Image: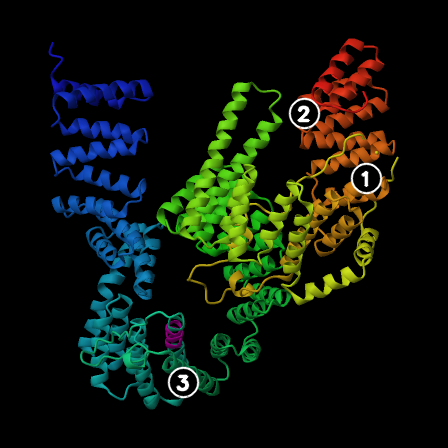
Amino acid sequence: MDYHYAPAHFFRGAVASVHATDEATRKAVVQHLNRCIHLDPTITGAYIVRGGLYGADLRFNNALQDFKAAVTIDPTLDDIWIQIAIVFLTHYHDCDACAKACTRALKNDLGLTQALHLRGEALARQGNVKAAMRDFVRLVMMQPTDRFAHLMKGKLLVQLDHARPALYAYKQFMEMGAEHESLDRITRGKAYKVTTVKEFKLAVDANPTPENLCLLSESLHSMGDTEASLHVINLAIESDPACARSYVRRAQCYIGNHAYKTAILDYDLALTLADKSELYRMYYERALCRSQLLSKAWNQLDAMQRGERVPCYYENNFRPGNDVPATLPAADMNVMCMTAFIKHTYVETANDFARCMKASHVMCEPYIERAALYVAGGEFNRAYQDLATALQIDPCNLHAYISAGVLKCRFSMYTASIECFDQALKHHPTSALAYYNRGVAYQMLNVWAQAESDYTRSIALDPTNVDAVRNRGLARCHLLNFPGAAHDFEDVYKHAPDDMDVVMGLGYVYLKLSRFTEAIALFKSHASHNPTATEAYVDAGNTYFTMAMCLADATTAASAVVLPAATSSKADSYKSLMQQARHCYLRAVRINPTDVAVRLNLAALFRARHDDANATRQYDVVMAIDPTNQDLHDEKAMMLLENGRFRDAIEHMHAAVAISVGLCPIVEIEYALLVKNKSMALHEWTRRRQVMPRTASPRASIMMMRVDRSYADVSRCGPDVATAMDGRDGKKRRMSVSADDVLADKQSIVGIKKTLSMHLANRGKVYEQMQDVAAAREDYLNAIYFDPVAFDVYFHLGTLALDERKLTDAIEFFAQALVLNPKLGVAHVNLGVTYLLLDAYDDAMHHLNAAGDIIPDCGFVWANKACVHIKQGHVDDALRNFSHAMKCMPTFAPLYVYRGRVLASQKHLHDSMVDFAAALQMGFTGDL
């Protein structure tokens, strides 16, 4: 037997590949194919089969190499070219390579429909819409029954602003997907496309009246053949120059081709020829045409004011030698002339609407459109009046209610806007747009549950509204429904993979779900597509930083119960994660050295690594760039506090508070009143306490818990979805409101108060470390005055009260902290200690058990439970809990002393001496 016969190895491997279902059999197949290729490198089948196996194992790089080798040997392998294109497009997102592979396949066979599909999709993703359009048109001609070719064609036609042909393409897609009578529907659709023009041509041949010519022109226009449509309508005008309808039809053709100024000239001619009964409609259409021209001029003016060069474009009016500039001639393309042109067009548009209203008193659409014009021009009172008039004419008009609601949202009149949307839904209960806008209004009011409900209804009625899906994801984030938010953001990400806001929101949700690997992959992918964007690097750095801190907490908690090798492995992982976070932050700093937020994150990283020198260096750079940055002063104060430099820390906290207070005159006045009247905050807390539900009457350590952390958020540049998702892309619904429109770059007073509360709380921490309890309590009370839901501040107030043995006040503060955050384990611990001091052992044990469920690795929980057991006379349970606490905190000497005392009281003198000796060895200097 010849073991060196290459075809034998190939056939053996090819046959075995059919039944290769597990890794072992696939390895055997690959061995045969490798042997075949080694003996005869020209057998293309071996490369193809091996590439298929690699593709099944998701080893796309190896598969691609084999497929390329196959087509190098035999370039006529069209199917392999297509497989190469699929790998490039779906797994590497390399549109250029995909298009080249498809082009090579089409050189061999022009009838490869799959190659046309792939190349069209690749070209569309590259932004080469016209070339992609040619491929899908060829595909429709080759396979008229391919409904997805019609779908892609319609999508590209929309991007090219050919609305009517796109509508017809979508119509064909929907008709071909019908389950019943599909053949008849397809036949009818083809007949509509193929024979409509022919029938109108026959009608024109039989009776060439202007009416028939207008119908033929409209038919051609609906198919996207604007040039032929204009030719026909010109024939109609030549046959009857006094027919106003022909001029209107030609103007509509020009509007479809964005030739607005030429269209206005035709409307002018039509108005001179039309009957009085037709004037109102022509005035209305001309006003809409002027509105679109005005929108184009405003865009050009904005570009000029930004300092961009705006070239002079000419309208495509199919009139050779009669070039009409889209807005102004090249000589007049400057800010002054463009402003004058806009003012003139604005006045003429408003006059056209007024003439239409005068000619027809029962038409409400002109009032709605003029209101939109007034809003764009800043005349809001007139806009309100027009919308009110429109609702008087038609009390059931959907667009009037939605426009009024959107306008009220713009001025923060959210309740009034919700009433408008309610009226719209009362008359039109199936309006997806009304539900969407009402959801936005509820979102602005932070009524997240109702906002989510409205977004869900809007999506059910209109699944294509991506903005509703995006906003529902935001609402679900605030409702802590992170799995649902992830589903929504993933759907939006599929439609807009380059939308930075969506990337940040999805990354935020992944972090909340502890899906760190996916978050990092997402941010790295975005960084690869946009290497000059700092956000992706910052988000990736924040993710690595978060993972490192979680790992550090887990390592610290489990250091007593894991093997040293495992602890060393976790320490290495922690160092690696911190190094990667540092690398990402430094990349962001190199891209934008003046971004203070990135430098503050980098400083926080150095602080976590106990590298105060580098952290200080970053703070100094930020101080040079932006000395009024309140986060800088706050975080530097926390670093100085950790180093025991209390005086320097308090100076920075004073600066942070002063900067925050100076942001808003209202907040400044309130803070001045608080400083002057020191009992004002306490009186406000007493008033709130009177309306709160009373806690149980007391019936209370040994060891209290304190939160030793700053209130500042380390990753302020991270994916804060509450602000990141406010942005929107360029395309907005004309009748919808977005968060950007409402906020209009105004800083919220509520946000300023929350930030001030954070600074006051941190300053209170500094005073507390300086043993100035009165100043600390004053700052804590002022903090909850500005932010009544700051649960950490209630915890610190309760801890101060517990230190001073004001146990009733401590119970109320801890109870309020737990109302705001039931998962605050340290509050359960200190509340348990408070009840222990009051001899309410059942209540103390209840809260300590709750703390044990939330923070089981905290030694203070078990130590205090041991104290409760001692008070109750349960010595064995106390010893068991002390032992558990020592496992959690093996280097905390007082635990050994406490357990030694209990053992000594039980006459276990040897064991107690062992505990006392261990405590002394750890440096305990108190009385045993």
- Which residue type does callout 1 highlight? Leu
Q: Nearer the viewer, residue 173 or 186?
A: 173
Range drawn in magenta:
292-301
Q: Nearer the viewer, mark 2 or mark 3?
A: 2
Residue under label 2, please give it.
889
**Residue at image coords 12%, 39%:** 76
Residue 803 belongs to magenta span: no
Q: Residues within 10 Å of mark 3 (few under 14, many from 20)?
A: few
Q: Residues within 10 Å of mark 1 (few under 14, many from 20)?
A: many
- Which residue type does callout 3 highlight? His
Rendered image: mark on residue 67: none
- Measured in 3D between alpha carbons, the distance from the residue under mark 1 to the one under mark 3, in whole angstroms, is 73 Å
- Measured in 3D between alpha carbons, the distance from the residue under mark 2 to the one under mark 3, in whole angstroms, is 79 Å
Q: Position of residue 872 (x, y in %)?
A: 86, 23
Residue 609, image quadrant: top right
The reply to whether residue 504 is in sight is: yes
Residue under label 3, please give it.
344
Per the image, label 3 sits on a secondary structure element best described as: helix
